Image (cartoon, rainbow, N blue to C red):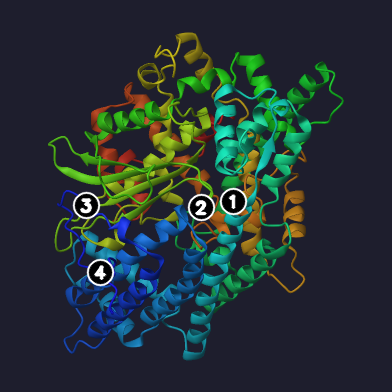
Amino acid sequence: MTIENPLLSPPPSASSPAFGLPAFGALKAEHYRPAFEAGMVENLAEIARIAENPSPPDFENTIAALERSGRLLARVGGVFWNLSATDSTPELQEIEREMSGALARHENEILLNAALFARVDALHARRDALALTAEQARVLELTHKRFLRAGAKLDETAKRRMAEISERLATLTTSFAQNVLADEADYLLLLEESDLDGLSEDFRASAAQVAQERGAPGKYGVTLARSSVEIFLQSSTRRDLRETAFRAWASRGENGGATDNRALIAEILRLREERARLNGFANFAAYKLDDTMAKTPKAVRELLDRVWAPALAAAKAERDDLQALAERDGANVAIDAADWRHYAERVRKERYDLDQAEMRPYFRLDRMIAAAFHVAERLFGLSFVEVEGLDLYHPSVRAFDVRDATGEHVALFLGDYFARPSKRGGAWMSEFRGQENLDERIRPIVVNVLNFSRAPDGAPTLLSLDDARTLFHEFGHALHGMLSDVTYPLVAGTSVARDFVELPSQLYEHWLLEPEILRAYARHAETGAPMPEELLERIQKSRHFNQGFASVEFCASAYVDLDLHESAIDESFDALRFERESLARISMPEEIVMRHRTPHFTHVFAGDGYSAGYYSYLWAETLDADAYEAFLEAGDPFAPDIAERLRRHIYAAGGTRDPAEAYVAFRGRMPNVDALLRQRGFAR
């Protein structure tokens, strides 16, 4: 008996009432392996037809044909990898481990196909004579580079080794991510009523619901979701409990046993270094950065050094303020990493009369979602109409039909906002379907995934200011995917250089704190009253508060990432010792911990995306600080002409041009670091 597989059925029409969504309700774990296998078989048949085409290579029969290939496999992967990150199960994790290696092997078969590369290489050699459009020329260039970086020009022995490395890395990085998820999902700090001093009523309610869901009714649960543990660290007056929670948070991935990541890190680093050397680079950082705006590790270090010195000075002054407050309290403590957030919140309260408990009622989740939508309407003419009754992958996910100013459908946007044990930690944007205009106009299905602590049923979910900023950040990524308007999938949406991809997201954060937006959307969760003007002013005045700490914890992670990928890794490598030595070289304050410590640094080790590239957020901040100043110079945060340039050259353009060219097309020039230093309060 043949079991019908919804993943292998013809894809639903994007214009259907269901927007072409996958049939989530019909999916079972056993559907994925056969669907992946069918997708790979079909894709290899497509590749064979391209590689063995007797006609001379041209753009249409080679590059465009490659762009059309693999659609079934992409569709299956788009469903599986999204759901394995948001609703993981032991069955899905087993498939994830198996398929990560199989897909790496499959990709190698394509990228190391000599006949296929010969066609691509021949086209690239005569690219100037092909009369290509600018986008086609870019797609040809990027396709050729992709083959080269995979080892297409190496001898057969080196090609085989490159394939082995790619397959092994896919398995290792999948295991790394699953280990971090396991450490996060397994942890629960259970509290009694007597342990709740300092915690707000809404946090207590959320913590009670967490405990109830974990089988401990009548108690209160703190998880390792950032929106849970950070608020606990800020608010709790119990130093012993803060230390317990912080220790668990900081030691994910290094607790021994099956989920310990230290051995994986060493092997990942050795294999990455070997891959780089096979490609002729001195180390993996040089290999990885060759394909970015920064280009070299030297350029990255120069940027980090420009920020590190003023950040370190500011952090030391902040530490002294925290210590002085503790001493005024009569607390016989030396401020350490588990104390910082708590005393920083108290200094914020003392200096600006601000605390999280006062601000959170004004940052209600549904109001912040509406605020993010409103900014997109003002800047880009978009509207968001919630769609009920769709078959979505989780009951808490919301769906919105995104339309332009003429009412035409632009994208389907999914919002998955709440933490759950099956969901990977952090926040991200992804796609179930990407945009392209190759054979027809295909509009994307974009999802934002966050990990907010959900309020009990009937109560509003309240966010911290940092949570609201994260929501705007990820929605900026979503807009980058939704507004994409290019022909070829290779350059659609967020398919840009890693140190450029954070520009649309970080830039979008600026509008959260625009007074006009706060006045309209920051309304009290219970009374509906707008945020008082004097509170709004205090928030504006506190923009630079604790920026030394924030900059130091970020830059430390970026330095360690770069050090790891510039170093030769031998059999004696110890990840924790390396981390300590790397931090000692930059005089890391003992009271601050890296934002992402090495054993749970998923940006770097749960895949290849930000490896040797965590600096990208800072690089993009140089761009976003300067880009927002264009609106400030115009005297209007929604200046129509600037917004139109922003849409055309940044949000809609994908990777159709070199990122530096794209930025200059928007701004008229490249930025320097001064705008970033001003944004962080380190310069005027």
Dot 1: element: helix
Q: Is residue 43 left or right of residue 172?
A: left
Rounded to the nearest whole Å, what is the CA distance between mark 4 and mark 3? 16 Å
Is residue 95 at all visible to an observer of this figure? yes
Q: State the residue at coordinates (44%, 14%).
A: 531
Q: Nearer the viewer, mark 4 or mark 3?
A: 3
Q: Position of residue 393 (x, y in %)?
A: 36, 51
Label pair 3/2, CB-CB below 8 angstroms: no
568, above or below 616, in the image: below
Q: Earlier in the sequence, mark 1 or mark 2?
A: 1
Q: State the residue at coordinates (85%, 18%).
A: 330
| Residue indicated by mark 3 | 443
Q: Amino acid type of disc 3?
A: Arg
Rounded to the nearest whole Å, what is the CA distance between mark 1 and mark 4? 39 Å
Q: Nearer the viewer, mark 1 or mark 4?
A: 1
Q: Earlier in the sequence, mark 3 or mark 1?
A: 1
Label pair 4/3, CB-CB below 8 angstroms: no
Q: Amino acid type of disc 1?
A: Ala
Dot 3: element: loop
Dot 2: element: loop
